[in-house]
Amino acid sequence: MQDNSLWLGSLRRPVKMAMIGFAGLTALLYAWLVINKIIDHEAIGMHEMIRPAGRPLVTVSLISIIATLLFASLYLSDTKGVIESKPQGFFDTLSLVTSRLAMISIALIVLVMFYEVVSRYVFSRPTLWANELSLWIAAFLFLFAGQYAMQQRSHIRIYIIYDLMPRWMQKTADCISVGLICIFTFALVWGGYNDALRRMLRMETFGTAWDPPIPGTVKPAILFIIVLVTVQAISNLIADWHKEPEHHSAADDIDETEIENIRRTLEEKK
């Protein structure tokens, strides 16, 4: 098992066990909360889940959910996809971990919206929180996706002119692009730090019936993750500095593994 480990090594199994343990605890707590809600309409609901003060069960549930997401992200980041580039340092590994969290977030949004559809159209009991929760999760999903795209060098890059340049000119272009990213990040943090800090300290809410602290969490997260994206860009520049010149074509965007999987699926159906 450790031979297939990307970076966890001997910690792979303990992380897996922790992930399974916290996931099981989260499932049990969720089942308990649902059953109590069915039996007693005054029981803990989604409104209380973001207001844990004086509710130990809510606090334990939130800690369990966070731990499950953390250990799941760590464990899933220990394997590399076929088309993914291998991490070359701490920041590459960090980007892989957050990318797995973004991957899990997609599944969470699907589950939330599925719950809303069933609750609304089957039981005629629409929720007050599903749309806002999916919006909250999606905000972090897009931020983490940007960090992952930077680590994988899959952001928008125009190679028509870049491939014609000699290597020294390519390095100059890379330095200019990373410099512009740094300037943008500095301006964003300089202009938004005080506002983000103010919103976070008072944990500003959304002003709706469920009233989640979306502004108080997302605004600081934007600045923090943009800084991580910039650090990742600098890390990429350092890692790619001594690479040989690369030439790109439209064929680079073709996923041969995915094509082979589709071909195999069609053959099996025949």
Image (cartoon, rainbow, N blue to C red):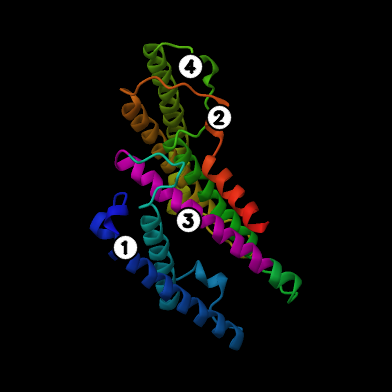
Screen quadrant of the C terminus? bottom right
Looking at the rendered structure, which numbered label has been put on residue 203?
A: 3
Sequence-first disc among 1 and 4: 1
User: Is disc 1 in contact with disc 3, using a CB cutoff of under 8 Å?
Assistant: no
**Disc 2 designates what residue?**
251
Note whether 179 is above or below 6 in the view shown: above
Spatial CA span between label 1 and label 3: 32 Å
- Secondary structure under tag 3 reads loop
- Secondary structure under tag 1 reads helix
Residue 174 in the image, given as x and y percentages of width and height: 41, 21
Note whether 247 is above or below 76 in the view shown: above
- Secondary structure under tag 4 reads loop
Residue 97 in the image, given as x and y percentages of width and height: 39, 50
Spatial CA span between label 2 and label 4: 15 Å
Spatial CA span between label 1 and label 4: 43 Å
Examine the image and state in which quarter residue 135 appears.
bottom right
Q: Is residue 14 left or right of residue 108?
A: left
The residue type indicated by label 3 comes to Met
Q: Nearer the viewer, mark 4 or mark 3?
A: 4
Q: Is residue 2 left or right of residue 246?
A: left
User: Is disc 3 in contact with disc 2, using a CB cutoff of under 8 Å?
Assistant: no
Sequence-first disc among 2 and 4: 4
Nearest to the observer: residue 266 or residue 96? 266
The residue type indicated by label 4 comes to Asp
Note whether 132 is above or below 58 in the view shown: above
Q: Which residues are magenta?
A: 88-116
Q: Is residue 53 visible?
A: no
Q: Is residue 179 visible?
A: yes
**Disc 1 designates what residue?**
15
Looking at the rendered structure, which numbered label has been put on residue 176?
A: none
